[in-house]
Structure formats: C-alpha cells, structure tokens
Image: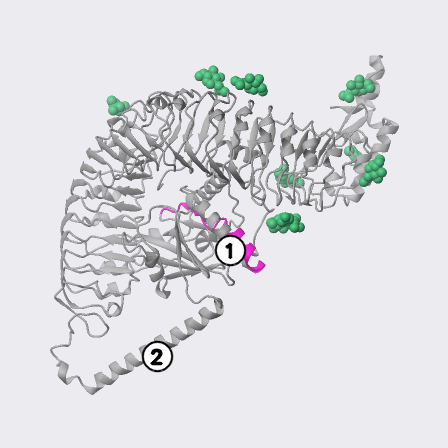
C-alpha cells in the first residue's frame, strides 16, 4: 500500500501529479499523521529504542515504516512480529485512535496482559509467543470489536474470564499452550461467529467437561482441544455443530460413547478422538461423507467397525488401533478410492481380510496385526505401487504370501510373524530396494536363505519356520544386516567364514538348526556382535579363540553341540552376561574368570571340565594331586581367609547400603517396584534389577547411570537408565512422570529410541530402552576412541566420515520432525544435544531422553538441567495446525 498517494488523490493534473511523486520524500504529512508519528516515536522510546525499529524517525512518514499500515491518512495496523522487543507495551499505543490490527507476536514481552483495552477499534490482537503471565483481564470485552485473538504460547494463567463470551465478533480464538489453571466459561458458546476455537495443550486446566453450550457454535469449523484436561462425555449437542470440519479432542480423559449424530456432520473432514476413554460402539449411522481422516485409536471402543465407514469416499486414513473392536472388517472399506492408511491393530477383529484392499486406492500403510483374522493375505495390496508396510503379525492368516508383493518396490517393512503362512516367500521381498525389515517368524515358510539382500535391509527374523539348506557364501554381501534371527529352522551345512564378515551384525541367532562341522577359526569382522546363539546344532571341533576378541559380545550360547577341547582362555576377557557352553564335550580347566558366581549353569553336562578355585559345582582340576582328606593346612587357611574376607566385604557392603538407603528413604523401609510396559515384553523386572551390577555399567550422566543388560530369554541387549530421585517425587509429579513416559512409550519411529518399559519405585526409576550399539554421537564427536580389538579390520576405527555425519544429521532431524509434527502428541525435546543422539549399529541416529528433561527440571534442583536451550515451549502455529491434521505414521517394531 503506497500510503502517501492519498494526499494527492484529488489532484487531477497528471503532470503535477508526476512531479509530486518524484518529490515524494519531501512531502509534508498531515497533522493527524504528525501526531500519530509522535505517539509511535514515544512508544519506540519506551520500548528502549530497539534496533529493529531504526526506520522509525522523525523525518519520514510513519506510513513508510515497514511495520505500519495506514489507510485514509491514519494508522490502522502495527506489526511488531519478531522485533526482539523485551519491554512492556506502553498504554499510549491506544492513542492511535484508529488502530485495528496489533501484532506483537514472537517477542520477549514480559508482564501481564498489555494495557491496551483502550484501543477500542481493535479487531485483531496477536500476542502469541511472548512471555506474558497472569490472567486475561476480566474486562477484556472492552475490546468490543475484537474478531481475532491469539494468545498461544505464553504463560497466561488463572481462569478464562466470562467476558470473553461477550466478544460477539470473535471468529478466531487461539489460547494454545499456556499455564491456565482454572476453567473456561460456558459463555464461549455465545460466540455465534466463532469459527476457530483452539485451547489445545493446556493440561493445567482444572478437569472440566465440555459444556453442552458449545453445541450452539453453528459456524465453528475447528475445534481443537487436545490435551486440555477434558473429562466426562462428549455432549449430544455436538451433533449440531453443522459447520465442523476438524474436531480434535485427543489426549484427554473423555468417557462414554461418541454421540451418534456426530458421524452425520456433513462438513466434518477430520475426527480425532484418540487417547481418551471412549467406550461403547461406534455409531452405525455415518453421513459425514467428507471425512478424510478418522483417528479413534487408543480408546475402549467395542462392537464392530460400522459398515457405514465404507461410504466415506474421501477417507484417506482410518485409525482404530488399540481398541476392543470385534467382528469382521467391512468389505466396502477396501473399495474406498482414497484410502491410504488402514490401521486397526490390537483389536479382536475376526474373519477374513477383504480381498480388494489395495486395488482401488493407493494403499500405503496396512496394519492389522494382533487380531484374530484368518484366511489369506489380500492379493493386490501393492497394486498401485505405493505400499510402504504390511504389518499383519499375530493373527491366524494362512496360505501363500501373494507373489505380487515380490514386485512391490515401495515396501519398507513386511511383518508376518506368528500366523500360519506356508510355502516360499516371493524372492523379490528380499531385494526390494527400500526394504528395512522382514519379520516372518512363527510360520511354516520354507525355502532357502537368499544370496542377496536389499541394501538397507537390517533386520531379518525368520525364526520358527522351515527354512532349509545352507548359509550361502554370498552372505558376505548382506552388508547392512544388523539382526539375523533364524533359530528353529532346518538350516544345515557348515557355518561359512563369510558369515563372520558381517561387520554390522549385532544379533545372530542360529540355534535349533542342523549346522555341522567346525566354526571358522578366523573371524573377519563381527565387530558389533553382541548376541551369538548357536546352540542345539551339530557343531563340533574347537571353540575358536577368535571369539575372545569380540569385545561387544555379552551373550554367547554354544550349548547342545559337540564342541570339544579346551575352552579358550581368551573367552575370559569378554564381559559376558550370559554364557552357556553346557551339553558339549569340552574338557580342561574353565577360564578363571568364569569360576566365580553367575556361571553356575554355563558348563553343565561337560564331564571333562574342571575348576581349581571358585564356587562352581565342577570337579577340581587338582583332585588327583591333592586328596580331599589331606588338604594342606596352607590351602585351608587360604580358603578360610578368602571366605572370611568375602563375608566381611558382604557385611560392610550391606551395612553401607542399608545406611545409604535409610538416608535416601527415611520414611520407607521396603520398596515395591512397579513395571509399566509399552509393548509385549519377554523379560520382567527381576531380569532388569538383577542386572544392575557394576559389571554392566556402561555410562553415567547428569541424571543417572546407564547399564547394559541382556534379556535373559532372548539375549537381546537392553539399555537401562537408572534415575535416582534425591527426594521422593511427590505423588502428582510421579503421575506426570508416568504419563509422560507413557507417551514416549507409544512412539514408534526409526529415529527415536524405543522405550520398552519403565520400572519405578519411590526412590528411583528405571527406563528400559533398546540397546544402541554405537552409543551416543557425543562419544564419536568428542569422546575417547572406540575400544579397539586385536582383530579389527581398518573399517572400524574410522572417525565419522562426512556421509555418515550427514546421515546422522538427517536421521536426527527426521526424529525431531516426527516428534513435532506427526505424533499424536507433539513433543518438545528441549534438550537436544549430541549425547542425546544415539547411534545404532548402522549409525542411524535415534533421539533419546526427550520429555524427561522437563520432568527432571520440575522436581529437582535447577542444576540437574542447566543446559536447556531455546525459548520455552515454542510451537510454531503453522506447525501445530499441521500436527492437528496429521497422524502418527508408525510401524510396529520398525
Ligand atoms: C528515516 O527513515 C527513513 C526510512 O524510514 C530513511 O530513509 C531515512 O534515511 C531516515 N532518516 C534519518 C535521518 O535517519
Ligand atoms: C476512507 O475515508 C472515506 C471517507 O472518509 C471512506 O468512505 C472510506 O471508506 C475510507 N476508507 C477506508 C479504507 O477506511
Ligand atoms: C526473527 O528475526 C531474526 C532477525 O532479527 C531472524 O534471524 C529470524 O529468522 C526471525 N525469526 C522468525 C521466526 O521469523
Ligand atoms: C483509557 O481511557 C480512559 C477514558 O478515555 C482514560 O480515563 C484512561 O486513563 C485510559 N487508560 C489508559 C491506561 O490509558
Ligand atoms: C513460563 O512457564 C514455564 C513453565 O512453567 C517456566 O519455565 C517459564 O519460566 C515461565 N516463563 C515466564 C516468562 O514466566
Ligand atoms: C494459578 O496460577 C497462578 C500463577 O501461577 C497462581 O497464582 C494461582 O494461585 C493458581 N491458581 C490455582 C487455582 O491454582
Ligand atoms: C456446511 O456448513 C454450512 C454452513 O457453514 C451449511 O450451510 C451447510 O448446510 C453445511 N453442509 C452440510 C452438508 O451440512
Ligand atoms: C469427496 O469426494 C467427492 C467425490 O467422490 C468429491 O466430489 C468431493 O469434492 C470430495 N469432497 C472433498 C471435501 O474433498
Ligand atoms: C512382476 O513383474 C514382472 C516384470 O515387471 C512381471 O513379468 C510379473 O508378471 C510381475 N509379477 C506379478 C505377480 O505381478
């Protein structure tokens, strides 16, 4: 808007006009503008002359200043967006009598609600992203023309005043993410012009029900009250919200059923009610034909999926997972032409999968695991070539895997575990270019191992099937494989030396097959190997010394084979949590390191093994030399001394622990541990608690110690972080901690570390994560050199190269983005640093430690988290809108 032109608008003489335009800078401004300029210059002064307002000077017209908009020679709008303002806004700003728009967003303005209620013509007020505190003024209705009010991301607190219900012109009310700790008035229901009502992320609101008066908001298009401490039922009156397009009430504690009429709202396009306590059936009547996304996941819904969903010809995403839905999947859902995401896992659905899935739409995500489905997998899931994942584990599906999936080049994951599938899987699945994980365990698949794998395929689980034949020598080309689980099949032949060249592999389980011959004496790589299980085969010969150089190994099971000869003493150098060499034909002395506690079962059923010290119940190696009757007094004295000192150590240690314990927990004398699990675990708290030994300690951080512990059953490694609370968490904080941890527990993303469970008692909390082989980025950037072994090939001693760094950066960014934008509950990390970016065996970045930072800073001293960077609670409004309309894209176990 070129404001000064108004001055000359009445002059009709074109030449003069032109002339004047040329001399514009010398113009004389009107008296009114002159006054308004003085007001603004005074305001600038009171704001401390911020450099960002340097164009505000007394020799130019205010209408020329970029922050100012004029109409008819008067100022109507001021935008101070992102001008680094740190002072309060002076009340004199309202001396600008015609001000309509005031935008103060993205600054650091402190203090209470600004003193601007005298700006009587104000229609747009943007205060978002500042440092305001205190209540919204009870007489806010003095701004009687207000149409647009955005207070997002401040620290406003208290009640939302009833006066807000008298701002009859309001069409836009954004109160996202503040510290409101009272209630909001039902009078909001009087705002007949309201189109956007957004009060999300205010979980300090007193628990309140949705007022039935809101049903009167006939023009309401957006209602977004995610995480606003809502309780009670959704009122029936919500059936009258005719204009409603987006409804997000997720992450509250709503109960009861979904009002039947809500699925008849013809303008509704997005319905998010996940993470509530909704129960009952989903209403059968569905007229909301514009619905594009539905997320009712994580509730207590029962009954069938309404066939009416099949009428929704614009539906792209249907999320019904984590409910108790039963019955069959209506066939007409598979005919919807727009369907991309179909996630109904963890219900009790039965019957067959409609065969037309994938034929009529660009299906991307198909996740129906953990139900009671039977019959065949649909033949055409990938007919449009867009399929990213097939997740159907834990059902009763049978038959062959459709050949067409072997041609599906878009696939990232295929998860068929624990069904009754048979025959061979299409060979193309192994080489599909983007494939990351193939999970086939617990079926009757047959066939041989492929000789070639997709480049990024890192996780293969074919356990408990009927795979047969040898391990191909070409296995050395499986360069990125990190986990290979192939136990309980009919694989046979020798273990080829090529298998030992997989430098990325961390878990290799080949137990329960028919492998024979000797183990390769040379190990080419296996630098990352942590778990090796070769038990229940027919392997023979010596146990190779080279195993002793696998410094990462913590789980070694060679039991039930025919190994003979001595146990190489090199094995004693390993920090093994679990060692099982039982039921072989080993002989000679057990390495000295294993002769003490913890290895009682490791050597059973090897009649020729012996020990000379320690507690193992094995024959004495020196039994022939020293008769037990004639134990020399020297030995006796030595043993006594050992025993006595051992006893004393135990006594001292116990005393110390008890004292320490009492100091920390003066009021409690016994502790009970509570296990909160986020997925099916095959270990329990005892497994974890017994592993909290100094031997397993792998790190210490500001918030606690980190241990590496093997899952007793599967041998998979777990990282356990122990957070000791110096003071007991008060009950409320404890609950918040659990709630927060629970959110983390439900996130699945390949760039976010997977939290498996949380074990807590009064004095400490244990967080159990998947173990990250390459530890933290910090360690690679700033830390000591990685441990080197005598066997290393040069590849492994690298400093991070640039492609890897780029990969890590991209991975971390993806993880953050997922947290910010795609999760059902956006999460702000607030403590992103290299030590919180963990790396797996393939150097994929995984964000760790999020959310907790916030908790820890609340309950403890400020010193626990001195390094929180950035502005508190920043949510870019555009992003949050986006978050509103996106749902979490996740695959189980990916
Ligand atoms: C005053 O501000 C204008 C821009 O608004 C600029 O062009 C002019 O040079 C400034 N004058 C002085 C004296 O700083
Ligand atoms: C400018 O003023 C004239 C007359 O005073 C009025 O008709 C017109 O609507 C005004 N324009 C704006 C944009 O306010
Ligand atoms: C805010 O302004 C600064 C410069 O003053 C700029 O670097 C930054 O990108 C701006 N931020 C936004 C969100 O516009
Ligand atoms: C607001 O306007 C009223 C009446 O015009 C005046 O008495 C009062 O001082 C003004 N308030 C402020 C903060 O300027
Ligand atoms: C806003 O509240 C947060 C959390 O309660 C607090 O950390 C922050 O310091 C507060 N900011 C202001 C400006 O009061
Ligand atoms: C709400 O928060 C404010 C500021 O933190 C506090 O002064 C007030 O007592 C709180 N009110 C309630 C009901 O908790
Ligand atoms: C959508 O809302 C408009 C009013 O905003 C209403 O007139 C129209 O009838 C609604 N459409 C349907 C299909 O209900
Ligand atoms: C829904 O789909 C129909 C055709 O199937 C289309 O005409 C209509 O515009 C779509 N509605 C929206 C909101 O996209
Ligand atoms: C897979 O693709 C090949 C070549 O593109 C084609 O000949 C074959 O018929 C396809 N198989 C299936 C099952 O779609």
Q: Position of residue 691 (x, y in %)?
A: 34, 61
Which span is picked out in magenta? 842-863
Q: Quadrant of residue 549?
A: bottom left
Element class at badge 1: helix
Asked whether residue 41 is in view, the answer is no
Residue 648 tag number: 2
In magenta stretch: residue 845: yes
Question: Picture coordinates of residue 647 (x, y %)?
Answer: 32, 78
In this figure, which residue is indicated by the disc labeled 1? Answer: 731
Q: Is residue 852 above or below residue 40?
A: below
Question: What scheme was used to colour the molecule?
Answer: one colour
709 on left or right of 835: left
* Crowd tier of the residue under label 1, counting other residues whose Cα lies within 10 Å: few below 14, some 14–19, many 20 or above: few
Nearest the eye: 862 or 385: 862
Separation (CA) of disc 2 from disc 1: 39 Å
Nearest to N terminus: mark 2 or mark 1: 2
Image quarter of the N terminus: top right
| Left or right of 772, for residue 41 | right
For residue 462, which numbered disc appears in the image? none
Q: Give the residue displayed 32% in from the left and 80% down from the top.
A: 645
Compare residues 143 and 800 and report the one nearer the observer.
Answer: 143
Quarter occupied by residue 613: bottom left
Q: Nearer the viewer, mark 2 or mark 1?
A: 1
Nearest the eye: 215 or 844 = 215
Q: Is residue 23 something one can see in this rendering? A: yes
Q: Secondary structure at mark 2?
A: helix
């Amino acid at each position: 808007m070129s404001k000064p032109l108004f001055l000359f608008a009445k002059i009709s003489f074109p030449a003069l006009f032109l002339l004047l335009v040329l001399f514009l800078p010398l113009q004389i401004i009107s008296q009114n503008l002159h006054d308004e300029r003085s007001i603004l210059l005074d305001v600038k002064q009171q704001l401390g002359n911020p450099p960002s307002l340097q164009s505000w000077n007394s020799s130019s017209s205010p209408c020329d200043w970029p922050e100012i908009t004029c109409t008819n020679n008067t100022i109507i709008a001021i935008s101070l967006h992102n001008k680094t303002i740190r002072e309060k806004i002076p009340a004199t700003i309202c001396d600008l009598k015609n001000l309509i728009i005031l935008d103060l967003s993205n600054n650091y303005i402190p203090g209470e609600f600004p003193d601007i209620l005298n700006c009587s013509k104000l229609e747009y007020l943007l205060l978002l992203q500042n440092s305001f505190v205190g209540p919204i003024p009870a007489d806010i209705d003095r701004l009687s023309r207000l149409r647009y009010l955005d207070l997002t991301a401040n620290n406003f607190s208290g009640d939302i005043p009833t006066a807000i219900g008298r701002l009859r012109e309001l069409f836009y009310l954004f109160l996202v993410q503040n510290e409101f700790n009272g209630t909001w008035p039902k009078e909001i229901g009087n705002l007949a012009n309201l189109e956007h009502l957004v009060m999300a992320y205010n979980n300090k609101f007193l628990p309140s029900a949705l007022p039935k008066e809101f049903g009167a908001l006939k023009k309401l298009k957006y209602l977004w009250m995610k995480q606003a401490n809502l309780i009670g039922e959704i009122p029936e009156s919500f059936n009258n919200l005719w204009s409603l397009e987006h409804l997000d009430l997720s992450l509250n504690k709503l109960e009861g059923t979904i009002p039947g009429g809500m699925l008849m709202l013809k303008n509704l396009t997005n319905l998010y009610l996940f993470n509530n306590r909704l129960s009952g059936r989903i209403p059968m009547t569905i007229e909301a034909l514009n619905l594009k996304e539905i997320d009712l996941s994580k509730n207590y819904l029962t009954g069938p999926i309404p066939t009416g969903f099949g009428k929704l010809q614009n539906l792209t995403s249907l999320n019904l997972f984590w409910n108790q839905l039963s019955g069959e999947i209506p066939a007409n859902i598979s005919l919807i032409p727009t369907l991309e995401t179909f996630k109904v896992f963890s219900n009790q659905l039965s019957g067959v999968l409609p065969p037309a899935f994938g034929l009529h739409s660009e299906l991307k995500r198909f996740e129906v695991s953990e139900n009671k489905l039977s019959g065949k997998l649909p033949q055409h899931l990938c007919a449009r070539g867009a399929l990213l994942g097939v997740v159907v584990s834990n059902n009763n599906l049978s038959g062959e895997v459709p050949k067409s999936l072997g041609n599906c080049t878009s696939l990232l994951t295929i998860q068929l575990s624990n069904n009754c599938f048979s025959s061979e899987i299409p060979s193309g699945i192994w080489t599909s270019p983007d494939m990351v994980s193939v999970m086939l365990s617990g079926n009757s698949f047959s066939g041989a191992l492929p000789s070639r794998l997709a480049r990024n395929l890192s996780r293969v689980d074919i356990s408990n099937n009927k795979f047969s034949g040898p391990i191909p020598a070409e296995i050395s080309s499986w360069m990125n494989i990190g986990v290979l689980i192939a136990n309980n099949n009919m694989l046979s032949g020798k273990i080829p030396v090529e298998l030992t060249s997989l430098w990325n592999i961390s878990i290799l389980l080949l137990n329960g097959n028919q492998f024979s011959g000797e183990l390769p004496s040379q190990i080419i790589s296996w630098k990352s190997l942590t778990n090796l299980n070769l038990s229940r085969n027919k392997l023979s010969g010596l146990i190779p010394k080279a195993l002793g150089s696998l410094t990462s190994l913590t789980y070694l099971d060679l039991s039930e084979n025919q190994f003979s000869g001595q146990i190489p003493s090199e094995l004693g150098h390993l920090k093994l949590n679990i060692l099982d060499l039982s039921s072989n034909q080993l002989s000679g002395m057990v390495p000295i390191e294993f002769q003490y506690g913890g290895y009682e079962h490791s050597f059973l059923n090897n009649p020729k093994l012996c020990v000379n010290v320690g507690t193992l119940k094995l024959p004495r190696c020196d039994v022939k030399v020293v008769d037990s009757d004639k134990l020399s007094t020297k030995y006796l004295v030595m043993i006594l001394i050992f025993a006595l000192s051992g006893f004393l150590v135990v006594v001292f240690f116990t005393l110390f622990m008890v004292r320490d314990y009492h100091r920390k927990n003066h009021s409690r004398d016994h502790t009970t541990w509570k296990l909160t699990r986020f997925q099916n675990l095959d270990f329990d708290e005892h497994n974890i608690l017994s592993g909290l030994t100094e031997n397993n300690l792998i790190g210490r951080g500001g918030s606690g110690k980190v241990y590496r512990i093997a899952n007793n059953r599967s041998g998979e490694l777990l990282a356990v972080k122990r957070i000791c609370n110096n003071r007991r968490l008060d009950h409320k904080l404890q609950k918040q901690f659990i709630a927060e941890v629970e959110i983390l527990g439900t996130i699945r993303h390949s760039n976010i570390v997977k939290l498996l469970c949380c074990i807590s008692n009064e004095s400490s909390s244990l967080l159990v994560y998947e173990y990250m082989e390459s530890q933290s980025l910090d360690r690679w950037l700033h830390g000591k050199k990685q441990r080197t072994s005598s066997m290393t090939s040069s590849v492994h001693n690298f400093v991070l190269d640039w492609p890897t760094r780029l990969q890590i950066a991209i991975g971390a960014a993806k993880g953050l983005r997922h947290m910010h934008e795609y999760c059902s509950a956006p999460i702000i990390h607030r403590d992103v640093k290299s030590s919180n970016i963990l790396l797996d065996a393939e150097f994929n970045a995984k964000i760790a430690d999020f959310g907790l930072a916030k908790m820890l800073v609340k309950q403890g001293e400020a010193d626990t988290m001195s390094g929180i960077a950035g502005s508190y609670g920043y949510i870019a409004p555009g992003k949050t809108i986006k978050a509103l309309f996106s749902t979490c894209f996740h695959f189980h176990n990916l």
